Image (cartoon, rainbow, N blue to C red):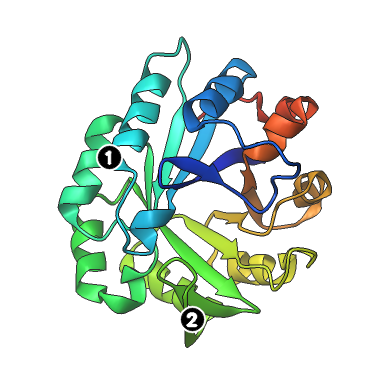
Amino acid sequence: MKIYPSLNLQQGQVVSTAWQGDACPPMPMDLVEQLLDGGATRLALVDVDAAMGRGNNRELIGQILHRCRTRDRKVCVQVAGGIRSSDQAQFFIDQGATWLVVGTILHKSPMVSEQLMARFPSFLTAAIDARGGMVHRAGWTDATSQSALDLALRAKAYGFRRLIFVDIPKDPTADPDFQTAQDLAAATGLPLLMGGSLTAPHHLEAVYSKPGLKGALVDALMFYQNPRLLAFLQATCA
């Protein structure tokens, strides 16, 4: 099982539903340093502003990628949020990103999806953002009538070799939708990662017992609040 601490970046800050307490969350670079010092070999970065079409955190993501490149071991970094053109994709690849995640363009701009796949097939991952099995897009703000399964099969038809199921919780106390994740993995036969609703330590433990899951995107602030969870991250990136 591959565990990815996920940093949701908005206006230069880390935002999260998992953060508890009155104190402010740590600055992004401080959180990255703690994760790397704790043995993390994988990170997931999500540009929330770019996903919602309200600016971007490109410079900050570039700084994080540069910091990861200077470590004494390989660190694989996945970048998501608003990647809707070849120029944007090329920028992050040049900065050292290992994987790029695309979501909204899968159903909003099929031609762009095909263009990206033609240029960057080994870098691309398709994101299926869904609540209750139905797809949402544009930073979770736009509900659609398309099922997660239909979009996953379309992504496979485009040539994507890796999927992420981003489970949008119905409320902060809802259990993760592991059933949809397992259904997508079984139907497509592709490596599947799950994220979105994994916001508690027991969610992190539960993913190990779910057939079909190859990895999990887990809120990075969980590891800041509970450093004992860093033990889940100490595995070579490959």
Q: Quadrant of residue 70?
A: top left
Indicate left or right for 155 with 211 as reference.
left
Along the line of sight, which residue is nearer the eye, 60 or 196? 60
Residue found farthest to the right: 202
Indicate left or right for 38 with 141 as reference.
right
Quadrant occupied by the N terminus: top right
Along the line of sight, which residue is nearer the eye, 37 or 15? 15
The mark nearer the N terminus, 2 or 1, is: 1
Up-down relation of residue 165 to residue 37 (above or below): below
In this figure, which residue is indicated by the disc labeled 2? 150
Q: Residue 150: give x, y in percent of width and height.
A: 48, 81
Kindly tell me whether residue 40 is visible in this rendering: no
Residue found farthest to the front: 22
Which numbered marker is on residue 92?
1
Mark 1 burial class by Cα count in 10 Å: few <14, some 14-19, many 20+: many
Along the line of sight, which residue is nearer the eye, 141 or 217? 141
What is the secondary structure assignment of the residue under circle 2?
helix
Instruction: Count up the numbered dots.
Output: 2
In percent of the image, x 75 and y 25: which residue is there?
227
